[in-house]
Amino acid sequence: MTQLNPYKIGFRTIKTAVGMALAIIIAKLIGLDNFASSAILVVLCIKHTKVHSLQAIVSRFVSCLMVLILGSIAFSLLGQHAIVLGLIVLFFIPLTVVFKVQEGVVTSCVILLHVFNAKTIDIDLFFNEILLLIVGLGIAFLMNMIMPSLDSNLKQYKQQIEQQFTSIFETFSRMCQTPNPEIDISFKKLKLTINKAKSIAFRDVKNHFVRNENSYYHYFDMREEQLELLQRMALIIENIETKDYLLSKISDLLSEVATNVNSNDYTALRLHALYEIRLELNQLDLPTSHASFRTRASLLQLLNELEAYLVVKSQFGSLRLHSE
């Protein structure tokens, strides 16, 4: 048996319902013909973001104006016949593609049918349809100005990502204590969380007309770059074969990084500790066995990847500074 989706009334649904009712009430009070069609305009123009809504409104207004002029001329000259209607649509749709307003084709067809069914095609019909567009599109624009803030969602995703990063570094720190460790970490969940966070951050950008970027988006993008480094570090740690003098120090450094996985820029101290370990590594005698030599090489490579991780963070700085 097919399982039904849970019943839910979203914010967009509420805006659509309220907008449709308002559009019909206003259009009827003004005394417009075909006043119910204003509700169709509202439904088609309610979008997830303010920018997309404005684009949809402009596209529909232009396309409707085009079909109103084209339909009025064609029906006046050739008559209000079904064949004429089909010919208008045949030429009109490619025309909307040329002017990049094809999003308004459905709305335009509604306006075209009004002209097709009109008893007389005159200036009154033209103004009636224009006012119908203004009411429907205007209500849709006002409804789309009411958008819920996404800041709380972005903060939650930020906390989730940082918690997962902390858990990964704590695991790395523990695994450095034992040779030939088996790291049981699922990076897919973290990658999915980052992708969702970036999607919401991008949507937040589209809710502002004058802002073309979002500091959270840059933050999540930075975390995505660091995730690739974490995956490489996991492979290196898995290849550690023997005990080494520097393993405990690297383990401590990874533990420090774990406690400082946040949006603030505390990377300078971690980089200083990393450089101290690298200098000490360069002064040590070469290993005497092949396994020890491979382990030492893995440690050097691990330090390089960790340095790249910290550098990425230092280049980003702090989320607070980006917001300002």
Image (tube, rainbow, N blue to C red):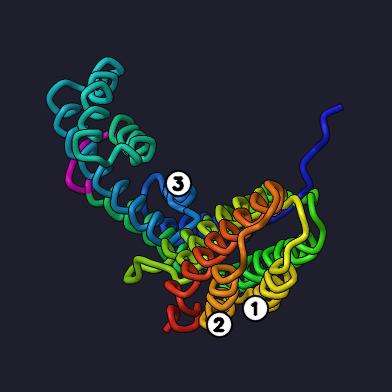
Q: Is label 3 in contact with label 1 (beta carbons under 8 Å)?
A: no
Amino acid marked by disc 2 = Tyr
- Residue occupying the point 65% across, 74% down: 257
* Mark before the other along the chain sequence, 3 or 2: 3
Please give left or right for residue 311 compared with residue 150 in the image: left
Q: Which residue is mark 2?
A: 266
Please say whether residue 122 is one of the residues in the magenta stretch: yes
Residue 249 sits in which quadrant?
Answer: bottom right
Disc 3 to disc 2: CB gap under 8 Å: no
The reply, left or right, for residue 298 in relation to residue 315 is right
Quadrant for the C terminus in the image: bottom left
Res. 44 mark: 3
Give the answer, above or below, for where 15 lies relative to 79. below
The residue mark sitting in front, 3 or 1, is 1
103 magenta-colored: no
In this figure, which residue is indicated by the disc labeled 1? 260
Tell me which numbered mark, 1 or 2, is placed earlier along the sequence: 1
Quadrant for residue 91, please give it: top left
- Amino acid type assigned to the residue bearing label 1 in the image: Asn
Q: Quadrant of residue 254?
A: bottom right
